């Protein structure tokens, strides 16, 4: 069994996506379940985790339309986490089947709001509902805030997206490795073996470079806290879905001699951290 733990859908005319710039012309079109379903069937991907790509209630409504469409087996929806009362209201309002986690886009903004008592209470409620929190920390200060929250909220499962901005595009490797060590020190944090928008924008797909950072992450987190993901269609900035998935599987065969460890990264970790096999109303 295999799970692609991070992908998106969107209708370009319906989505403002303020993160999308002139250099992202490849992404200015519709990406729907019909586009992905054939690819996942061809490559033997059994399911995907659909993740929000734009903040706002309208995004949850779009995700709800797609949540029952194969290959989706779980959905990470949007909540305005900086405003707990608004987040609770949206949580009550949205009707999102297969909801397994939440996130909001944090960019490079300070995450000191995570220290607030009302925010910690909200995350406690999310943990109590068995929902995870996805986040993309990009620098040391953000990583420190994420680790502090993970320690402050018992039972909270944190999923760090996109290798916490690996140094594939010339970023400071020593600083990134220190951030990975810090994040891995918190047992409530897992990480996705995927590449995010900022890196994809400036980096050409080079599997050997990805293997190098993958080794660091696997050593730090262990297979039980790493899950493979393509970040489709954002990955199309650097390589097509077939290339990304096949290269990642090949890299894992090189990095993890144990078939059981590879199965964890390709399937088990995502199932466990997102509770993909649980009964839902």
Image (spheres, rainbow, N blue to C red):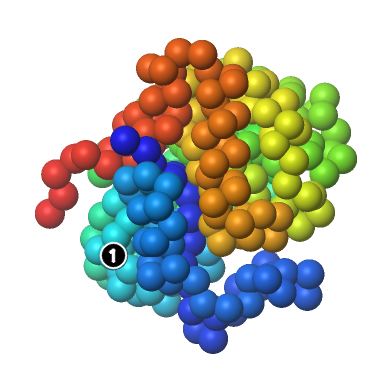
What residue is disc 1 on? 69
Is 240 on the left-hand or right-hand side of 268?
Answer: right
> Quick check: 156 above or below 240?
above
Q: Observer-nearest residue: 112 or 264?
A: 264
69 relative position to 169: left or right: left
Q: Is residue 140 above or below residue 6?
A: above
Residue 231 image position (x, y, % from top left)? 55, 52
Choose between 117 and 138: the one closer to the eye: 138
Q: Position of residue 226 (x, y in %)?
A: 49, 29
Q: Is residue 206 visible?
A: yes
Q: Give the side of residue 82 with respect to residue 198, left or right.
A: left
Residue 98 x/y as whole percent: 26, 55
Residue 249: give x, y in percent of width and height.
52, 34
Badge 1 marks a residue whose secondary structure is loop
| Residue positioned 63% across, 71% down in the render | 27
> On the image, which quarter does residue 140 sit in?
top right
Is residue 191 visible to the viewer in this orientation of the structure? Answer: no
Say above or below: 190 vs 5: above
Quadrant location, the N terminus: top left
């Amino acid at each position: 069994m295999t799970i692609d733990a991070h992908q998106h859908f969107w209708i370009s005319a319906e989505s403002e996506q303020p993160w999308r710039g002139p250099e992202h012309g490849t992404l200015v079109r519709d990406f729907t379940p019909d586009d992905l379903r054939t690819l996942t069937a061809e490559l033997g991907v059994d399911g995907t985790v659909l993740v929000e790509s734009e903040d706002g209630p309208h995004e949850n409504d779009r995700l709800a339309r797609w949540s029952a469409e194969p290959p989706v087996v779980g959905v990470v929806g949007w909540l305005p986490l900086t405003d707990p009362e608004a987040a609770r209201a949206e949580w009550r309002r949205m009707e999102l089947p297969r909801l397994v986690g939440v996130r909001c886009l944090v960019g490079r903004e300070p995450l000191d709001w995570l220290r607030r008592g009302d925010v910690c209470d909200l995350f406690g409620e999310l943990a109590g509902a068995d929902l995870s929190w996805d986040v993309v920390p990009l620098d040391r200060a953000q990583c420190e805030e994420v680790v502090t929250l993970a320690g402050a909220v018992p039972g909270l499962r944190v999923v760090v997206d996109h290798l916490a901005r690996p140094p594939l595009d010339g970023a400071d490797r020593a600083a990134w490795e220190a951030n990975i060590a810090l994040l891995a020190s918190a047992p409530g944090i897992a990480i996705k073996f995927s590449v995010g928008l900022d890196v994809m924008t400036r980096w050409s797909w080079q599997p050997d470079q990805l293997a190098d950072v993958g080794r660091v992450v696997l050593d730090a987190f262990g297979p039980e806290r790493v899950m493979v993901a393509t970040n489709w269609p954002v990955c199309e900035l650097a390589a097509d879905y077939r290339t990304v998935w096949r290269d990642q599987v090949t890299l894992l065969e090189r990095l993890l001699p144990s078939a059981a460890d590879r199965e964890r990264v390709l399937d088990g970790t995502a199932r466990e951290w997102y509770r993909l096999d649980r009964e839902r109303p």
